[in-house]
Each structure stands twice: as structure tokens, then as C-alpha cells.
Image (cartoon, helix red, strand yellow):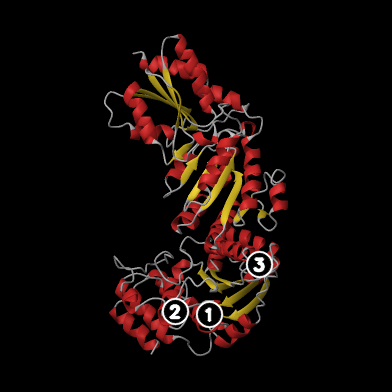
Amino acid sequence: MSEKQVRQQFADTMLAVGLEDPDLVVMVGDISHGILQPFAKACPGRYYNVGILEPTMMSMGAGLARAGLFPVIHTIAPFLIERAFEQIKLDFCYHGLHGNIVTVGSAFDYAYLGCTHHCYGDFALMKTLQGVQITYPSAPIEFDTLFRQAYRNKTVTVYRVPGSQHGIGFAANDIQLGKGIKVADGRDVTLVATGPQLKTAMSARSLLAGSGREAEVLYIHTIRPLDEELILASVSKTRHVVVIEEHMRSGGLGDDVLRATRNLPNIRYASASIPDTFIRAYGSYEDHCESVGLTPGRVAALVESEFAR
Amino acid sequence: MSRPANAARAGMGEILNKDLRRQIVDMVVAGKNGHIPSAFSIVDIVAHLYRHVLKVDPKNPKWPKRDFFILSKGHGCLGLYVNLHRQGFITDDDVAQFCRRGGMLGEHPDSLKVPGAEASTGSLGHGFSYAVGIALGHRIKGRENRIFVLVGDGECHEGTIWEAAHVARSYELGKLCVVVDWNQSGMQLLPHDDLPAKWKAFGWKTMVIDGHNDAELTRAFDDVRFESKGVPTAIVARTVKGKGVHMLEGHGIWHHRIPNAEEYAKIMEALS
């Protein structure tokens, strides 16, 4: 696993791209201020720590795009995706404008802070908006590669930056916006994982191998547009699919996998995800994963219980 | 319905833009939709801007050096449409298709359809923040474009107005000028309505004028310095909702009412 945090890579990529592209502008809602200082110093007049006013920061981002710039808007996920949802919908999407939304603190990454700082429904919300691209880069190389591929696209792109990583070392050439990655071959069940939960999927695969089940593992770093072709090819073979994600069951990647495979006969499906409820408990990220079943043992058990019948 | 207090202080002179007001009423009757009083409240301000202030080119609505006019209170769009028509941005046929299937003009403007409409507004509190971003963006690009925004006083209930006012002042967006359509809609609900004091408190250069008086509009816009880095300006314009036709004035049923034949005749007589 890279020792560098994906969030640090975000700051490093802003600096690198900002030096190449004079139209890149970064606005933050009073977070990541320290790590973005190199960008601020190297790109004067293009860094704004706007303050605690996320809806206006979002609308201003749309205004920057209208002026021909490429805005990056960054703060904690619930305050951008949920509080400023209408600004994304109307000021960006309805106006046909482009922009980049970089969140931290999605799902329960801010585990100790309670439900005000959780955001488990961001995929679902963003999928209701026309043309929005949703990425979940869970290693530094993924953020850098996906950002460079997407940031000048003529639409809004969301980058869900996680607090942990999956630990698989992909090369930049492996990463293409909108394309999933087959990480491991198998014939009995397809494990579709997104975000740091790829690590869970790979460990679950090892557990399942002990009981003679071969799991194929697909990694999805782009939730939208979704690589349905890769998923269909795998599930057509295995006929069993489990989706593993740090998102509410409703509206997550699992729903898209179900839709993509709806015409395949005799498919069995299960979801390892966050229940459609507030996670009111406190504790660590790992505690929360344990409580909702996002562990290798629980995923392996899910496969056994759902598919052994 | 009693006349609003502003009626005693705004627009006591000659009724301006009777032709535009008649056109607004005709569009509402033909399209069977529209907010006549809201449009009458702003039509003199918008007409003044397009005639005397804005640098725009109807033949090239996307002219890069143009001034931007953003109607943040989108439900007043008839006041914008008739001026875009008069200036030649949109055609007779476009106007005839108001609120009809296939037409480009609806009850709120769609900037991807309407030449000269710089923002798709309707949900209040968006256009102003968007305009602040445009102003900042043009400054980053080193351009001289001026940005004008018209907001409603009811719209000033929205928190985003004050978020954006705070940012614009702190960032010294001197090319930004907001006109507040102070027809006292807002004070019906929240009577603490001293909008000039509020804009001053946020550090804006603030003027109070009669929004139905061309001479005062001229003086106000002449007094804006439009510095690239300077204090933004708020022109708080006392207006009368429904201004120009006594029966339409105020905050009652005419907000979204379509005149019947008898009412239409009375309105047109008042505007003759």
C-alpha cells in the first residue's frame, strides 16, 4: 500500500496540473488548507479558501466554469454533496457546465464525528444528475490518473477521496475512466468491489478458496459511467454476484449491477453495503465496517449463506 | 389590497415603458402564464440597463467582452424577455411562443435556449452566487467584463445571498453591481426589512434610488466605479410590484393571475 494518503495525492496533483494548466482553480471550504499551500504559492490567484459556505462555493464554481476556467471544489462530502446538491443540479448541470468536486469524509470515514459528518448516499444522489461522472479513486495513482483524464471533460466529475486504501498496486496504464479492472479470475462467484473494499474482497477470496470456491474479483473505480460490459462478462460466467461497497444499499453500485445483469437468467445477487439507516454508533472506521458486515469473514459468510442453498 | 408603502416613495412620476408593460400583459394573456406584477416591478430597471448601461451585442450574444446581466429573480423574466426582444436578441416569433410547447421562453429563463439570458434562474438565491463566481473568474482571467445582477427583496431571505455578498466584498469584486428590487414583498413575511443597512453592513457601497425613475437610475449607474479590485456596489431600488396599473399594484392575487377580457381592457386602458 502506498504510504501517501489519497488526500495528499489530491494536493500534489493540484500542484502538478496547476503548473501545467493556468485555467485550473481550486476552492476549498476551510479544509486541506495546509496541504494545498504548495499549489497556492505556485499558482497565485487560483487558490481560494472561501470559508464555511458550501452552497455559495458551489455556485461560484459554476461561475468560474462559465468564465472559462476549470474549477475544483473541495470539502467534506455531506456539505458538498448533500447541502449543496441543488447548486450542483442547477448551477452546474442545468447550465451544462463542467467542474470537479473532490470530497473527503464520504461514507463513515469520519467515523468518530457522528452522523452529521457521514455521507453514505452520495452515489445515489449524484446519479440523479444528468451526466455527472462519479469516481472513487482509492490509491494515489488512481486519483492522479483519473483526475488528469476527467478534469477538462464537459461535465461534472465527483472524486470520492477515501481515508483508507485497498492496497493493490495498479499501474497508471491500468486505470481508465469508465473502465473496471479484473483483479483476479474465478469461476464460482463474482465479487464486485469499489473503494477500499477491494481489500476486503481480496481477503474474502482467499477465505472462499479454502472452501473450494473460486471468486472472480472486479474493481470499480468509476461508478458512473459504469463498465457494464466487464460486469456482464463475469456474471454471465459465474451466475453469482456480491457487490461490496461503502454506500447505502439504496442507490449504490449494487443497484447498478442488478440493472446491468437483469437480463441474465438464473442470477443470484447479494449486497455487502451500509444499511439504509443512520450509523449512530461511535468508534473507528474499522468498527463501522465490522458493524455493517464489510469484513472478509462476513463477506465470505454471505457468499456461503446466499449461494450454498 | 392596499398599496405598498413604497408606492408613496417610488415611481410617483411618469409611467415609463408603457409599451413594454403592454407587451408583458399580451404575452401573459397569450401564453396563459406569467407573473405580471413581478415583471412590472423590474421592467424599468432592466430597460434602463439595456438602453444605457450594458455593453452587449444582440448579433453576438456570447461576445467575450460583453457585460453580463443576470436576472437572479427568475420569475421576473417577462421584464427581461421584452427587453431582449426590443434589443433584437429574440424575435417576434419567439415572443409569440411564450410558454408554448416548442417555444424557447418559459416562466423562468433557460440560458441554454434564450440568447442574451446569462443564467437559468428560478430557484431563488442561485443567480447572485453564480454571478459572484463569474466576476471572480473574469478577474482571474484578467478580463474587464462588468457583472450586473438583479435580485428580489424576497430573494434576500435566502442565506446564499448573504454568503455571496460576504465573499464578493472580501474578494473586492469591484466589477460586480447588484440591483435589489425592493418592492417590499419580503417585508410581508419578515418585517425587519432595512435592506440598505444590510448591504452596508456587508461592506458594499450602497445607494437607494427610485427604481422607476430614469434620472435616478442614470445617476446611480454613473456612480459605480467598476474597479477590477474594489468595493462592489448595491443599488437598492425602491419599486412597486405591479407598477403602472393601479389594480395590479401590491402583493395580492395578481402575483400569478391571468387577466380576463374585462381586466385586460382595463389594464390596457391604464397603459395607453
Residue A137 in percent (x, y) is at 54, 36
Element under disc 1:
helix
State the CA–CA distance, disc 1 to disc 3: 20 Å
- In the drawing, what numbered circle is on residue B173? 3
Q: Which residue is mark 1?
A: B49
| Residue at image point 44% right, 32% down | A249
Element under disc 2:
helix
Under mark 2, the amino acid is Asn
Badges 1 and 3: C-beta atoms under 8 Å apart?
no
Of labels 2 and 1, earlier in sequence is 1
Element under disc 3:
loop
Badges 3 and 2: C-beta atoms under 8 Å apart?
no
Under mark 1, the amino acid is Leu
Q: Which residue is mark 2?
A: B83
Residue B271 in percent (x, y) is at 40, 87
Q: Nearer the viewer, residue A85 or A46?
A: A46
| Residue at image point 52% right, 63% down | B127
Under mark 3, the amino acid is Leu
